[in-house]
Image (cartoon, helix red, strand yellow):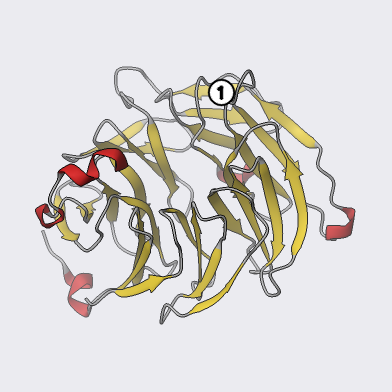
Amino acid sequence: MRPILMKGHERPLTFLKYNRDGDLLFSCAKDHTPTVWFADNGERLGTYRGHNGAVWSCDVSRDSTMLITGSADQTAKLWNVQTGTQLYTFNFDSPARSVDLAVGDKLVVITSDPFMDVTSAIHVKRIASDPSNQTGESVLILKGPQGRINRAVWGPLNRTIVSAGEDAVVRIWDSETGKLLKESDKETGHKKTITSLAKAADGSHFLTGSLDKSAKLWDTRTLTLIKTYVTERPVNAVAMSPLLDHVVLGGGQDASAVTTTDHRAGKFEAKFYDKTLTEEIGGVKGHFGPINALAFNPDGKSFSSGGEDGYVRLHHFDPDYFNIKI
């Protein structure tokens, strides 16, 4: 499995997202410029210029016409995927951290960081079908979690919002009323900052990765803990195969401590685990720094990783990957 090295970012990667068809890959990095690539050969298709700070996350509409990005410049922007033009800018009082479009692309959930005396918040905004009618007001604003909310995503049927972040608690909110429905248990939950959250293709369960060197699989409706995957380094990124029962974890020590280790120690690999048995089944080495972003192609036949080293590595699986037996 030879990776395709995609060099286009000047700074560390923060997020990767495939479109629904799996033919485009969108990457976000700390260099202010989200980029779109062809997902089969890794060729760069274009960039989205306009942000004035690190871009933390993105999401793309089901029909691949609209992109939304959240940035440290305290804005979330809507873009025309094809032309790269800005359609609208949502302004916040603090950096916009996570963006996630609802099924139907009529709503988006955006999290904003704590900043000075502003607390972190989860904002639900309407997306107008015609960008000229777009407004910036929130349908709902949720507050409560302490520290940064690193990820907030929609639950099944857009009825709930699942959030996780620095206070290590996974929360499920009612997306209509804003009521807090469930919180993860202190005993079974993560012990340190939750860095990442990935939903299963069918939305029935989701995976969280944490600096406590573990990833956990949860039931989306009941917030029951299903599985725990233990690694020997902090987890920065998680992904789930839509095809096989595999979960992938990426991480490495904190960026500030990286220079103290030898890159050949091979600590910067994406580790594959069997979803049900929680056993490690393999790893993909290659990055010269921690892995900050992971994404599976919707067809499950390739995945990509984004690193602190500024590279996106695109891996198309060999045929024998699909026959792994434990």
Q: Is 108 left, or right, of 33 in this rendering?
A: right
Q: Residue at x 81, y 42 (%)?
A: 136
Compared with 53, 310 (above or below) is below
The three-letter code of the residue at mark 1 reads Leu
Q: Secondary structure at mark 1?
A: strand
Q: Quadrant of the C terminus?
A: bottom left
Compared with 313, 204 (above or below) is above
Residue 37 position, x and y percent, is 50, 73
- Rendered image quadrant of residue 313: bottom left
Which residue matches tag 1? 181
Q: Is 8 left, or right, of 257 in this rendering?
A: right
Q: Is 212 left, or right, of 193 in this rendering?
A: left
Q: Residues within 10 Å of mark 1 (few under 14, many from 20)?
A: few
Compared with 132, 80 (above or below) is below
Q: Residue at x 43, y 42 (%)?
A: 197
Residue 194 position, x and y percent, is 39, 33
Q: Compare residues 267 and 187 and report the one nearer the observer.
A: 267
Residue 114 position, x and y percent, is 57, 26
Q: Quadrant of the N terminus?
A: bottom left
Check the image and name the residue furthest to the right.
133
- Rendered image quadrant of residue 301: bottom left
Residue 303 position, x and y percent, is 35, 66
Q: Residue at x 27, y 53 (%)?
A: 289
Q: Compare residues 267 and 259 and report the one nearer the observer.
A: 259
Q: How many marks?
A: 1
